[in-house]
Amino acid sequence: MRRERRTSSTIATHHSGVMSDDAVADQIFAIGSEIRYVAFGTGQNVVLRERPRLIDASSNESDRYEELLVNPTLLLLARQRGDIDCGGLRYLVVAYGNFWQLVIPTDHASHVSVSVESDADPFAAASRVVAVMREHMEREPAD
């Protein structure tokens, strides 16, 4: 039996690398009050936006290191495994004690990370975030 090999399903970012458009973050926050923070990361560049007055918020410094070190590493490992024979990687869901973390790969070795309240459905949130990102990319002008 022959299997077709699929690679990771990534969402394209615009040519400058980090998808940091405030409009995208605003649309992700508009999903609902369950969205705690949105981060865009490419290499050493990280852009973070946090909802005001969060309860049990992580420190900004630990969030930055998560975007610089943890999430790119998790994506690398899961993407490599997914590309072997699992049909690629759509996104990761991490269940921390105080919140869910969605990590969505984009192209250019980039990612979008969205923190979601622990009592929310992370899979529904992930579907909505991916839809927002795809909609935004369809509106991006081509180079």
Image (cartoon, helix red, strand yellow):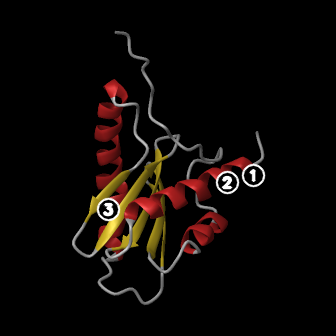
* Dots 3, 2 in contact, CB < 8 A: no
Question: On screen, 34 above or below 129?
Answer: below
Q: Which residue is mark 2?
A: 135
Question: On screen, 49 above or below 131?
Answer: below
Q: Amino acid at mark 1?
A: Arg
Q: Which mark is residue 139?
A: 1
Q: Quadrant of the N terminus?
A: top left
Q: Residue furthest left?
A: 97
Mark 2 or mark 1, which is nearer to you? 2
* Spot occupied by residue 53 in the image (x, y as percentages of width and height): 43, 90
* Spot occupied by residue 63 in the image (x, y as percentages of width and height): 34, 68
Q: Which mark is residue 82?
A: none
Disc 2/disc 1 C-alpha distance (Å): 7 Å
Q: Which residue is mark 3?
A: 65
**Residue at figure coordinates x 75%, y 52% from the top left:** 139
* Dots 2, 1 in contact, CB < 8 A: yes
Q: Quadrant of the C terminus?
A: top right
Mark 3 or mark 1, which is nearer to you? 1
Question: On screen, 112 above or below 82?
Answer: below
* Dots 3, 1 in contact, CB < 8 A: no
**Residue at figure coordinates x 41%, y 59% from the top left:** 123
* Spot occupied by residue 97 in the image (x, y as percentages of width and height): 21, 72
Does residue 46 appear in this view? no
* Spot occupied by residue 77 in the image (x, y as percentages of width and height): 28, 39
Give SS at disc 2.
helix
Give SS at disc 1.
helix
Q: Amino acid at mark 2?
A: Glu
